[in-house]
């Protein structure tokens, strides 16, 4: 197959157009007014989406691209190029990002209508699209880092979008600071890569990995002997934990729901938070060489998948339920990567992007209808008011719960099978049970939310009742587009692209992802599935777990609606534990926030205010200046003979000095 | 000395057509380089007479005449300068690149001062004498700029000084104005006496009034002449320091600035300083080259004192004219770093500083004059409160001028400071440059405080602006110049260096 090169101009236009739109609207939004602003941004992102699809089709035909456009900086041997690497991994990310972004852009017209920050919001989300595209399209670790930080910045700006709300500012800071922890690890990982490999380009680094591992580099860290490659992978993964909200750095994601719902869908569900999974998949040629790092990825992902699912069981804020579900699903994706089924991780990333964006946008539609109330305890029986939202949300929920043939079923099922097939000791064993039991909880909390919102008893306050209505077309049309994705993305990925089937010669990821055959659980899965009929899922545990989760939710929130309260009362400890999110926030607050605040306050009040401001500045410097000023003013008496006297003194002083000097 | 002939002179004036038509030849000093000055003198006298016949509503024609005179004299000067350096009156007048550049600044300052005066003087009865005094003062300055000789220098200096005394006291019925003029006159006379005394010692030691010749003689004077040389040095420095407001010879400055009509304050803050500094540089470089160690030390102490006085006292002022008077003193303190460096870079730095200062200071004064309210100029700092809301354009321009005066990059004022500071550091005066840096930080306070009034305070009294397109254009042009010089300082610095290159 010939390796056709992609068109450079086209590739540059894909991130360039949203950037131009973002800058135009950001700088001149006040003059462009709302209509023109959103038209520019939507046109920009739709163009980027169209070009991305075009690139994707070319990539399917075997085209690719690798090249540097210019050099950002050179410092001795440290060279930072700016370039792009377009392969199948990049292409699927580009398509996912731009399509979801386009849907969210359109949706925003309806959702943010009348908001004073309307044009600012459009500028931000277009800027986000640009940043995310840079993140996925770069050909080296520095463009990755640039995109990584840029999406973090936009995320910060958008969480704190309603900056007059104190809770929004708090959540934005929390997201930013927690991400700092992860990014610290990430930066160390990149620096270590440069230190060991002398380059930051993927191509050079990945080519050098096998020889590097062969040389057995190791380093001592805090008394530990560690493979250099493990160190690098673990450091990079810590960055991924921050960005992709893995335990214990997951605490920022639920709070990020303070931001407007469209960005919850775009940034905090479909795209930005999946950057960590993308990065691990991109670095598969490194992670494959470190069993330790893979085990860590698996275990952290499994813990997150399970734990966040338990928290999701009892949340009452519609967006928080979905947010915890996002954390949990991100855990699934990491489990897939950890068990060397990177392609399945990316597959789930893609399907998740569609159905989770759909769920968020549908939730936003509901929130819009009930006048910005997010508490599902004050909803119920909304079905008759908003049928379109109801249907699309049902599709999203079925996809999330993993009911065939919806998108989530295809990818999630593969993750569980992969965890079962990959034998890497207790880590994969543990992960298997976590993700398996997670299926039940996922189905339960999804449908709990669904039934409480659309069925159950009517608990909508009378005040909002008059306002209930189906959302306008700009909101429902993106829902329907995403619903199509949530229905078909799984089947399309598995049966058309053969994303996770190494037995098929032209399987989607054949070049972009590197896996040792010995590690690859997909080979065994593919062999087994040869023998299975299409209705094989009827004989698997995940399917029945999902069904029973939905059934239990139906029973508790549709039929016997007084049952949940009784259950909560029966196990008050468990309920409180889950409702307080395993007390993670309280732990962080006591362990990190309070001591840091104490230290900051001490430095501020004792060191800055008392010593520097009061002592040095006001006492010494300002005091001296004021005294000097008074003296100067006193000398200016206004009496002419004083002035003359000053001149005479000046002359005599100079003369005296000269004579004395000789 | 080359003998020039009258027909050459006329031929120059009439062009080639005139050559041959005049047959008479008689020896005559070369007066060609002096033609611009002669034009100014003639125009000044003509305006004085002409104005008497102008009806009151056309008095502003005198202003236009003064402006055209300056522009014409400037054009003539530049045309003469194209022929290279020239001398006139047997070496009593020189027209080198240095003098030409100084005259560019002097005429520019006078033109701007006339623009600022036009509205201010509206309805005044004696505009003729006002503008003719301005022109005579300008004439004195241009003579100073071209003086290679103590006689010419003193002539120019006294002509300039006498005109400014009168102009400061122009508003005879305002007590403050008369008082300022009288103080300025008494102290100015004292300074003139001191300067003359210094010149007499120079003449006593060298037997010459010519800068270069006197410098030669002083350099070769024996040890028994040391005392006389020291007296000459100190008295010369003291007299010159008075003219450019160096502490402790500065004390007339705040009173005179405050008492003078505002356009005159603007006028005094540029032209006389340029002329004084040109003389200063010529005296230091030509007359006192052998005493470099002595005068740099004395000037260093005076510079520190000047910076301290200017920047510290300005903080305590409520009147913006007084504040700008102290600001001038502070800036002179910075300019002195260029004198102390005592090399081509330092002197070029002085010219750069004065060039930028012309624009930023004139712009600031233009704003002050534009802010007339209820017949009184916007003189108090409080008067600027709320300007940002009422007139964003003026507010922005004033902010640019103030930031430039404070030396914020990348405005002209930053490069002005940068050039002299670097010159001082490279000449080995690191500590002086550090002190100057500290004082410019102090100085930033009182400039930026005005910006705070402009943008952050509520308007107190209703503004009452002069709507004069010419002055508004002046504000725009000076503001653009401050920004342009800040962004592209290269050409200006290169021109200043070449202006100095031929002299040192």
Image (tube, rainbow, N blue to C red):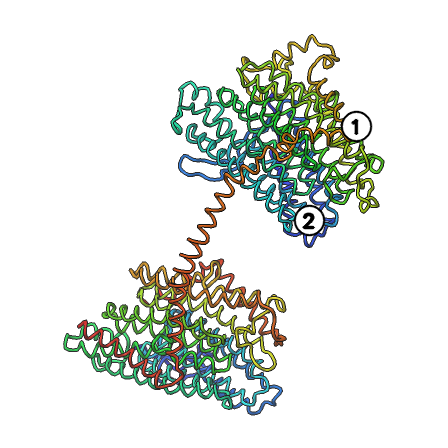
Query: Residue A119 shows which numbered tag?
Result: 2
Query: Residue A560 shows which numbered tag?
Result: 1
| Viewer-side residue, A248 vs B242 | A248
B53 lies above or below A623: below
Query: Which quarter of the rendering shows the N terminus of chain B?
Result: bottom left
Res B118 seen here = yes
Chain where mark 1 sits: A
Tag in front: 1 or 2 = 1
A602 lies above or below B122: above
Chain where mark 2 sits: A
**How many neighbours does mark 2 have within 10 angstroms: few (below 14), some (14-19), or many (20 or more)?**
many
Q: Is residue A204 left or right of residue A642?
A: right
Q: Could you tell which of marks 1 and 2 lies nearer the N-terminus?
A: 2
Query: Which quarter of the rendering shows the C terminus of chain B?
Result: bottom left
Q: Position of residue B243 (x, y in %)?
A: 37, 78
Point out the residue furthest to the top here: A531
| Viewer-side residue, B155 vs A66 | A66
Q: Is residue A387 left or right of residue B108?
A: right
| Viewer-side residue, B146 vs B362 | B362
Q: Is residue A505 left or right of residue A463?
A: left
| Callout 2 secondary element | helix
| Callout 1 secondary element | loop
Q: Is residue B194 left or right of residue B60?
A: left
């Amino acid at each position: 197959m010939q390796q056709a090169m992609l068109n450079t101009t086209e590739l540059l236009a894909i991130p360039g157009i949203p950037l131009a739109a973002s800058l135009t609207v950001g700088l001149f939004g006040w003059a462009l007014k709302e209509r023109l602003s959103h038209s520019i941004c939507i046109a920009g992102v739709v163009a980027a989406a169209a070009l991305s699809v075009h690139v994707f089709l070319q990539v399917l035909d075997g085209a690719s691209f690798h090249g540097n456009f210019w050099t950002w900086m050179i410092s001795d041997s440290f060279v930072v190029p700016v370039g792009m690497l377009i392969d199948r991994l990049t292409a699927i990310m580009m398509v996912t990002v731009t399509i979801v972004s386009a849907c969210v852009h359109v949706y925003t017209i309806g959702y943010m209508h009348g908001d004073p920050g309307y044009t600012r919001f459009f500028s931000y989300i277009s800027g986000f699209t640009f940043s995310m595209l840079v993140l996925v399209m770069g050909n080296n670790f520095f463009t990755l880092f640039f995109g990584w930080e840029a999406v973090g910045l936009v995320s910060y700006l958008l969480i704190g979008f309603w900056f007059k709300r104190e809770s929004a500012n708090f959540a934005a800071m929390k997201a930013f600071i927690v991400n700092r922890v992860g990014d610290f690890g990430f930066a160390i990982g990149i620096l270590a890569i440069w230190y060991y490999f002398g380059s930051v380009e993927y191509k050079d680094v990945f080519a050098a990995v096998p020889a590097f591992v062969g040389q057995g580099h190791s380093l001592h860290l805090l008394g530990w002997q560690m493979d250099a490659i493990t160190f690098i992978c673990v450091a990079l993964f810590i960055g991924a934990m921050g960005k992709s909200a893995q335990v214990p750095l997951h605490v920022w994601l639920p709070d990020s729901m303070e931001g407007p719902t469209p960005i919850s869908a775009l940034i905090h569900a479909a795209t930005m938070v999946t950057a960590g999974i993308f990065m691990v998949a991109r670095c598969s040629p490194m992670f494959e060489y470190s069993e330790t790092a893979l085990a860590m990825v698996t275990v952290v992902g499994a813990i997150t998948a399970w734990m966040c699912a338990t928290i999701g069981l009892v949340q009452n804020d519609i967006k928080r339920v979905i947010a915890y579900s996002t954390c949990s699903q991100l855990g699934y994706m990491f489990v897939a990567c950890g068990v060397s089924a990177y392609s399945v991780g990316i597959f789930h990333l893609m399907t998740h992007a569609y159905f989770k964006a759909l769920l968020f946008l549908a939730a936003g539609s509901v929130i819009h209808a009930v006048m910005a109330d997010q508490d599902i305890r004050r909803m119920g029986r909304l079905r008759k008011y908003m049928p379109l939202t109801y249907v699309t949300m049902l599709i999203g929920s079925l996809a999330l719960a993993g009911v065939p043939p919806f998108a989530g079923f295809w990818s999630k099922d593969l993750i569980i099978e992969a965890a079962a097939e990959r034998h890497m000791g207790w880590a994969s064993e543990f992960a298997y049970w976590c993700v398996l039991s997670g299926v039940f909880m996922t189905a339960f909390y999804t449908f709990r939310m669904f039934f409480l919102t659309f069925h159950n008893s009517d608990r909508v306050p009378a005040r909002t009742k008059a306002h209930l209505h189906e959302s306008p077309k700009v909101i429902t049309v993106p829902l329907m587009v995403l619903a199509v994705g949530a229905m078909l993305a799984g089947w399309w990925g598995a049966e058309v692209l053969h994303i996770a089937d190494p037995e098929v010669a032209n399987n989607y990821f054949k070049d972009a992802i590197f896996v040792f055959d010995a590690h690859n659980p997909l080979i065994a899965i593919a062999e087994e599935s040869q023998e299975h009929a299409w209705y094989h899922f009827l004989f698997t545990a995940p399917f029945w777990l999902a069904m029973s989760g939905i059934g239990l939710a139906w029973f508790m929130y549709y039929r016997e609606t007084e049952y949940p309260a009784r259950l909560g009362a029966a196990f008050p400890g468990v309920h409180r534990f889950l409702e307080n999110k395993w007390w993670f926030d309280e732990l962080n607050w006591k362990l990190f926030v309070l001591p840091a605040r104490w230290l900051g306050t001490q430095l501020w009040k004792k060191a800055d205010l008392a010593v520097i401001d009061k002592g040095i500045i006001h006492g010494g410097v300002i005091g001296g200046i004021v005294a000097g000023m008074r003296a100067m003013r006193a000398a200016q008496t206004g009496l002419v003979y004083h002035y003359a006297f000053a001149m005479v003194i000046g002359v005599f002083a100079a003369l005296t000095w000269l004579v004395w000097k000789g | 000395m080359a003998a020039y002939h009258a027909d050459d002179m006329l031929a120059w004036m009439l062009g080639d057509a005139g050559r041959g038509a005049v047959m008479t030849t008689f020896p005559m000093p070369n007066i060609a380089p002096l033609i611009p000055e002669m034009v100014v003198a003639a125009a000044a006298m003509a305006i004085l007479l002409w104005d008497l016949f102008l009806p009151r509503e056309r008095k502003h024609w005198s202003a236009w005449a003064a402006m055209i005179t300056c522009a014409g004299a400037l054009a003539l000067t530049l045309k003469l300068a194209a022929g290279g350096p020239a001398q006139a009156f047997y070496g009593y007048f020189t027209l080198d690149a240095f003098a030409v550049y100084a005259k560019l600044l002097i005429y520019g300052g006078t033109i701007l001062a006339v623009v600022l005066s036009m509205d201010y003087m509206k309805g005044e009865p004696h505009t003729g004498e006002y503008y003719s005094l301005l022109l005579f003062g300008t004439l004195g300055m241009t003579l100073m700029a071209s003086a290679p000789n103590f006689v010419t220098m003193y002539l120019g200096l006294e002509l300039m000084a006498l005109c400014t005394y009168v102009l400061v006291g122009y508003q005879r019925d305002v007590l403050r104005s008369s008082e300022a003029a009288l103080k300025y006159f008494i102290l100015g006379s004292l300074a003139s006496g001191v300067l003359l005394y210094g010149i007499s010692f120079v003449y006593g030691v060298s037997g010459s009034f010519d800068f270069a010749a006197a410098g030669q003689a002083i350099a070769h004077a024996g040890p028994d002449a040391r005392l006389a040389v020291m007296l000459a040095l100190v008295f010369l420095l003291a007299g010159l320091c008075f003219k450019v407001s160096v502490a402790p010879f500065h004390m007339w400055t705040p009173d005179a600035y405050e008492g003078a009509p505002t356009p005159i304050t603007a006028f005094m803050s540029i032209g006389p300083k340029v002329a004084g500094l040109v003389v200063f540089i010529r005296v230091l470089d030509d007359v006192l080259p052998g005493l470099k160690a002595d005068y740099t030390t004395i000037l260093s102490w005076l510079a520190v004192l000047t910076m301290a006085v200017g920047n510290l006292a300005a903080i305590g002022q409520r009147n913006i004219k007084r504040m700008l008077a102290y600001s001038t003193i502070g800036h002179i303190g910075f300019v002195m770093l260029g004198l102390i460096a005592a090399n081509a870079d330092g002197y070029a730095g002085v010219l750069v500083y004065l060039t930028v200062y012309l624009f930023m200071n004139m712009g600031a004064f233009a704003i002050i004059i534009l802010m007339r309210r209820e017949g009184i100029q916007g003189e108090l700092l409080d008067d600027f409160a709320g300007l940002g809301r009422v007139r964003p354009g003026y507010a922005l321009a004033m902010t640019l001028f103030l930031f430039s005066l404070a030396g914020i990059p990348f405005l002209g004022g930053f490069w002005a400071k940068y050039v002299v500071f670097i010159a001082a550091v490279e000449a080995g005066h690191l500590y002086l440059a550090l002190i100057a840096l500290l004082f410019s930080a102090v100085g930033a306070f009182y400039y930026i405080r005005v910006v705070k009034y402009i943008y952050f305070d509520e308007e107190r009294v209703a503004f009452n602006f002069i709507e004069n397109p010419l002055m508004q254009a002046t504000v725009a042009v000076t503001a653009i110049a401050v920004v342009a010089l800040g962004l592209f300082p290269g050409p200006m610095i290169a021109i200043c260096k070449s202006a100095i290159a031929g002299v040192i």
